Every structure is written in structure tokens, then in C-alpha cells.
Amino acid sequence: QVRLQESGPGLVRPSETLSLTCTVSGGSIDGYYWSWIRQPSGKGLDWIGYVSYSGRTDYNPSLKSRLTISVDISKNQFSLKLTSVTAADTAVYYCARQYGGDPTTSSNWFDPWGQGTLVTVSS
Amino acid sequence: SFVLTQPPSVSVAPGQTARITCGGINIGRKSVHWYQQRPGQAPVLVLYHDTGRPSGIPERLSGFNFGNTATLTISRVEAGDEADYYCQVWDSSGHLVVFGGGTKLTVL
């Protein structure tokens, strides 16, 4: 059974870079697409972007200028870097596996999800 | 970008049927996926491609998608069904994943 676990600092200073890693266990990162999704406290879900096993990416247009998502197959991990953060980036960040085939032509969904990690942006 | 509209809350008595809607222009032309999120937990996929049920999801949960509305139906509601439910579509033309705002299901 595939499991995902997010890791990274829980507190980031404004204007700095938020960095998170998702470690995949119980299965290979190879052959799949992987996403980051966030959820501000008490609010809904917001898709951040995805990376494929081969390094192909697509990002939420609202975050694209600040965002980098990368993959490390050798470590079975993928990572997120979000620059120039503000309080608006405070949220629980989830990583998730995508299903459904090539996302440029097919509808994708997310299963499973990691447990999530709270990142607070504050000085 | 594509907008999905869900009612903020739905209340139902145990044993009754809950229907959670997800509205969007011509959503019937898209595949809709549904997630359940219990308090303090990560979302869990409960339906994919409108009607598909992942392993472990009971048959009490079903979906329908036509026109401008997709619906998640939960039959014989139990206390354990109390959660937030989110619909999701994949808008490949806009390079965007869209989630509905979520519906809080309360079991009375």
C-alpha cells in the first residue's frame, strides 16, 4: 500500500522560501504523476502543481512565478519550493498521487494523500 | 477558469439519504471526482470519474453527473459519514485542477 509523508519546516519567515519534501513508501514514484495541494485553515482545497516521474511539471497559474516542483526517483521523493512567501501561503500542505493517465489529455484524480503538514508564514 | 459551486452545508438524519451537489457550466461534459475529509484528517477519494468507487468505499456512496450538476448521493447515512465533501475536476485547457468549495455534511 502506497504511503506519502510530507516533511519540512513548520515555520517560514515572510519573503523567504518554503521547501517541502514528500517521501513515497510502499511503491515506486516511477510511472506516476505527483501533486501538491494546500488548504488554509478552515478553507477549501487549492491545487498547487504536479510533477511526473520524468520531471514534467504543470503549475497553478496563480503560483507559477514563485513555484518549482521537482522529483528525485533515486530517493523516491518529490519536492516543492515556493519563493517570496507571505501570510497568505500559510496552510496545511498535502502531497498526493495522481491517477488517470496523461493529465494533458485525461482527467486526473488524487489517491492517496499524505497526512499533511502545517506551514505557517510568520516573522 | 472553471468554477465549481457546492452548498456550504447539508444536514440529514441517520438512515436517510444525503445528496451533495456540485454545480458548474456543462459539468456533465467533464469527469468529476469526490473526496471525503473528516475533521483533522487528509482528504480521501470516495468517487472517481463520476461514478467509480475505489476499493473500500461502500456501495452506499454513488454519483451522477449531467448537465450543469454533479451529485454525490450517500444512502443510509451513518454518523461516520459526517465530514466535508469536495468535488474536483481537471481543467486541462486551463492547466488547472479545480475543487469545489466543499460541503459540510452533518448527521443529525
Image: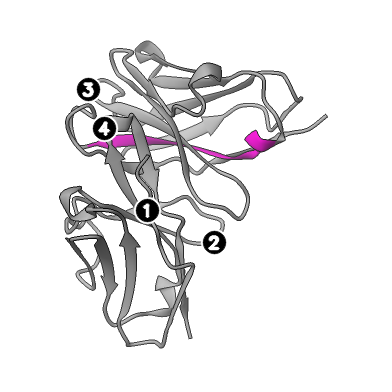
Mark in front: 1 vs 2: 1
Q: How far, Cα to Cα, is label 4 from label 3?
A: 20 Å
Question: Which residue is label 2 attached to?
Answer: B39
Colour treatment of the image: one colour
The answer as to whether the residues below labels 1 and 2 share one chain is: yes
Mark in front: 4 vs 3: 4
Give amino acid for label 2: Pro
The answer as to whether the residues below labels 4 and 3 share one chain is: no
Label 1: how many Cα within 10 Å (few below 14, some 14–19, many 20+):
many
The subunit carrying tag 1 is B
* Residue B52 or residue A24, whichever sits in front: B52
Give amino acid for label 1: Leu
Q: What element carries label 3?
A: loop
Using the rendered image of the protein, determine whether residue A109 is visible from the camera's viewpoint. no
Residue at horizontal 17 percent and vertical 55 percent from the top: B52
Of callouts 4 and 2, which one flags the residue occurring earlier in the amino acid sequence?
A: 2
- Prevailing secondary structure class for the magenta stretch in the rendered image: strand
Residue at horizontal 27 percent and vertical 72 percent from the top: B73
The subunit carrying tag 2 is B
The subunit carrying tag 3 is A
Question: Which residue is label 1 attached to?
Answer: B4
Q: How far, Cα to Cα, is label 1 from label 2?
A: 22 Å
Question: Which residue is label 4 attached to?
Answer: B92
Mark in front: 4 vs 2: 4
Quadrant of the rendered image containing residue A36:
top left
Give amino acid for label 3: Gly
Question: Which residue is label 3 attached to?
Answer: A31
Does A108 lie within the magenta span?
no
Residues drawn in magenta: A88-99
Residue at horizontal 24 percent and vertical 67 percent from the top: B58
